[in-house]
Image (tube, rainbow, N blue to C red):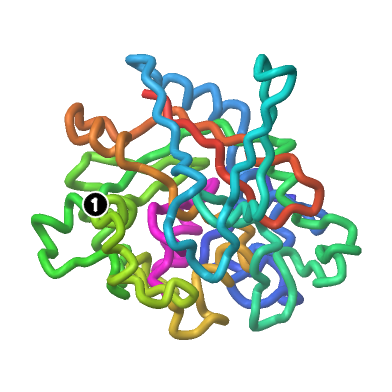
Amino acid sequence: MAPPTALPTYDQLPIDPKYPDKTAWGVWGEDDNLGTLNNVTPEITVNASHCIKKGRAFPLNWELEKPCPTMFAREKITHNFKSIAGGLANDDFYDGFNPQASSQWDGLCHVAHLSSGKFYNGVEATEVCENGKGRLGIHHMARRGVATRAVLLDYGRWAQKNRPDFDPFERIEVSVEELELVAKAQNVTFQQGDVLLIRFGWIAKHDQLGEKVKELIPDPEHPIACGVKACPETFAWIWNHHFAAVAGDNPAFEAFPPTDWSASCHAFLLGGIGSPIGEMFNLESLADDCAEDNVYEFFFTSAPLNKFKGVASPPNALCVK
């Protein structure tokens, strides 16, 4: 098993010809369930804590009721309030709670490496299904926890000046060349173990539209949205920076729908290299603060739901500056 400091480059993947091309299977051992989260070491966590300068926390969970309507035909949550003890105490419970209906981590068993028909690290579907062994379940991420450095690339603000045709509700692909330009404009550098956060402005537009959002997303079961371009250049860029995870404020992180699911970011990130994907992270307050103080690095924490065999979870994430 390779230590993070000795990771192969993208061009060196796979580490064994028995694995599919450009996968990180076996890099952290054949029994690994964490994937790129292994890039976070205790030393990296300690160093990340030094990003805390003013003691302000920014929660990244969007309201559970949003987006409205839900995307991809996912159930809408219903909140049930239960008054007890003559109104002097209260309980509540949820119906129709889909952990992928709002802000979410896609866990490693969400989408397989489609061209090989197996999940990350060669895991068979029978090992992750309802009657399986719990391989790649979200509980692995939850029981480790995430505490590391995060950086924000505010592509949405950058695009207002540099790509005036950009519309987060259109299927516009964002290249790594553009992301590098954003990073340069913000004076952002990347480090091993970072969580990469990209603000496209999708949530901002959703909330600004209110009820009119239904007119611009007429088919929420099959939404169209901006996102990162799925291509070998993107895959190499993400892998070679050794991020712990990636996340955006849009429905799928990548431009949606994919032109080819087998060559999608989901197939590469989740199934190929074992990188969690964050979607619909609410980055608005964080981005506003960054625009004021020009600080785009933070101490980042995330505590997903500890559900054995879970596929996904709200991120329960904080950025602390």
Residue 75, given in percent of the width and then of the height, sits at 60, 61
> Which region shows up in magenta?
234-256
- Identity, as a three-letter code, of the amino acid under mark 1: Gln
The quarter holding residue 44 reads top right
* Residue hosting label 1: 208
Tell me if residue 40 can be seen.
yes
Residue at horizontal 55%, vertical 37%?
316
Q: In the figure, is residue 201 to the left or right of 95?
A: left
**236 inside magenta stretch:** yes
Nearest to the observer: residue 57 or residue 154: 57
Q: In which quadrant will I find the C terminus? A: top left
Q: In the figure, is residue 211 to the left or right of 158?
A: right
Residue furthest to the front in view is: 86
Residue at horizontal 24%, vertical 61%?
178
Q: In the figure, is residue 258 to the left or right of 30?
A: left
Residue at horizontal 64%, vertical 41%?
80
Seen in the picture, residue 191 relative to 156 is either above or below; the reply is above
**22 inside magenta stretch:** no
Residue 138, given in percent of the width and then of the height, sits at 71, 49
Tell me the crowding category of disc 1: few under 14, some 14 to 19, or many 20 or more residues within 10 angstroms, Cα based.
few
| SS class, disc 1 | helix
